[in-house]
Every structure is written in C-alpha cells, then in structure tokens.
Amino acid sequence: MGYPDQRFDVNLSILFTELPLLERPAAAVAAGFTAVELWWPWIETPTPPQAELDALKKALDDAGTQLVGLNFYAGQLPGPDRGALSVPGEESDRFRANIEVAADFAASVGCTALNALYGNRVEGADPQVQDALALENLVLAARAADRIGAILLVETLNKPESPLYPLVSAPAAIEVVDKVNAATGLGNAKFLLDLYHLSMNGEDLSQVIKAYAAKTGHVQIADNPGRGAPGTGTLPLERLLDELKDAGYAGWVGLEYKPGDRPSAEAFDWLPASARAAG
C-alpha cells in the first residue's frame, strides 16, 4: 500500500510549464515518469493546424511517454474560463468543432480518457438552457470517445476558485455522468475525482470515495491548502489513495499540483524514483 502502489501520471499543463510544451514530455521522463496528461494545449483554438498536432504527437512518442488523459477545448484555461460546452453561442460551437479533433488526436497517441469541463454559468443565460446544451454536447463527446475506445470524464471543480462553475460537489458531477450514460446507453461517461477540488469544497473525501469509486474514471491530486505537492498541506493523500484502491479503483492518479518556487523536476521528492515509471 502507499504511494508506490499507485499508477501516477504528470499533468504537463501545470508542471514543467517553465519549458516549451514540446520539451515537457522528455522532462517528465528525465524525472522518472512515463505517463502524462494534458489540458487542451491550444487555448486560442479548438482546431489547431495538423502540423502542431503532429509535432505534439512526435514529442510524446520521441520521449516514450504515454498520454493517459486529455482535455477537450475548454476556453482560456488557465485563465477565466472553466470549459465551453455549456456556454451558448460561439464557445459551444468551438467545443463541437474540437470534439473530433481531440478524439482523433487521442486515438493517434493511444489516449483513452477525454475530460470535458462543463463551463461557467453565464450572466443572462437560463441555467436550464445551459444544462440542456451541456447534455447535448456531452452526448456528442461521449460518442466520439466511444468511437476511439475511450471514456468521457466529467469533473468537479471547487467553488472558492471557480465561483461560476456549477459542478462544485461530487453528487453534482455524478448526476451529469448518469444523465449522459442514460442518454447514450454507452456507459462510458465517468467521474473525474480530484481530491484537491473536493477538499476545497469541504466534502467528506472518504465518503465520496466509498460512494463513487465505481463511477470514477480518473483521479487527480494536489495537497490543500496551496495546491502544492503531497506533503505541503494537510490532506492525508496516501491514505485516501489507499482507500480508492481498496474500493476497486485501479486507474491513473494525475499529479496536478503547482511545483512552488522551485523547478518542476524538484517537486517530486515525496515520491520514490522507483515508483514514478508507469507499470
């Protein structure tokens, strides 16, 4: 049990950001990791030139890294946005334009988990209209994910940092997961269980794990307070990950934390080098 018993991947959109995107996979490998995940790297466009997609695939392949998670287009992230799929008008259109692009890229690198951030509430827009649009777009995304043998992830964020995001509890995200699965009949929508976000919302983490491990498709961690590496805050992350494993979760644990003032390569002291490479 403990950290060495987990399968970790590094989120290259929050760690190693001191390097250009195409150098980050190799940096992760140099730090001992072989699995990585990414937010949508092209925040300005849902449909980047094929040459840029090919360059990222080459960087991942050349480094020998496995991409295990990829976000669909989510607007300005990092930044003011928290997704696009429930935002009426241009942003919803951009999300739809991205669905097949992201799915095809994921397929090209063997990535089998696609995360669809829900999007913020918009002033003047009816929440029910936004939720209906969200379900419509999530159904499209779930079908695209299914086409490539992937799962669709729905994530809870935290209210203090994302006050306009409606999915700020585990039950709220689970409700969306269940609605998508009921609408598609595919069963490939899953919960992205982020222990940092859930702890920021004041949820009982052990209870969430017990209740929803079976519907969880991916896990992310950071310590709280501070969103730093394990050990920089007060969350019992090692125990919580053991609880997840005991509850039947055998998937990836994404390291989605801030390295602090030091280079990213030095932010992994908490994890023995022997436990970093994916088994």
Image (tube, rainbow, N blue to C red):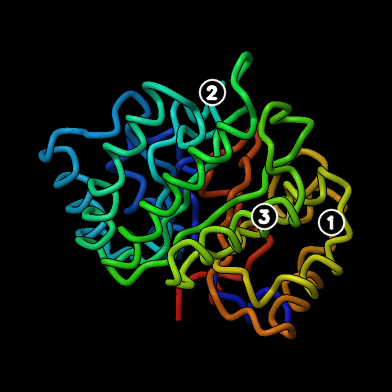
**At x 68% / y 27%, what residue is drawn?**
164
Amino acid under label 2? Gly
Question: For the view shown, which residue lies furthest in the left direction?
Answer: 51
Q: Quadrant of the C terminus?
A: bottom left
Query: Regarding mark 3 in the picture, which secondary structure is present there?
Result: strand
Amino acid under label 1? Leu
For label 1, count other residues whose C-alpha is less than 10 Å away and answer few (under 14), some (14-19) or many (20+): some
What residue does disc 2 label? Answer: 79
Q: Earlier in the sequence, mark 2 or mark 1?
A: 2
What residue does disc 1 label? Answer: 235
Q: Is residue 119 visible?
A: yes
What residue does disc 3 label? Answer: 194
Q: Is residue 34 visible?
A: no
Q: Position of residue 143 (x, y in %)?
A: 34, 61
Query: Regarding mark 1 in the picture, which secondary structure is present there?
Result: loop
Relative to 184, say whether 72 is above or below: above
Task: Decide which of 26, 139 is in the foreground and name it.
Answer: 139
Q: Quadrant of residue 149?
A: bottom left
Q: Earlier in the sequence, mark 1 or mark 3?
A: 3
Q: Earlier in the sequence, mark 2 or mark 3?
A: 2
Disc 2/disc 1 C-alpha distance (Å) = 26 Å
Amino acid under label 3? Asp
Query: Regarding mark 2 in the picture, which secondary structure is present there?
Result: loop
The residue mark sitting in front, 1 or 3, is 3
Q: Quadrant of the N terminus?
A: bottom right
The residue mark sitting in front, 2 or 1, is 2
Q: Are marks 2 and 1 in contact (CB under 8 Å)?
A: no
Task: Decide which of 212, 92 is in the foreground and name it.
Answer: 92
Left or right of 91 in this view: 226: right
Disc 2/disc 3 C-alpha distance (Å) = 19 Å
**At x 51% / y 57%, what residue is drawn?**
153
Task: Decide which of 108, 24 is in the foreground and name it.
Answer: 108
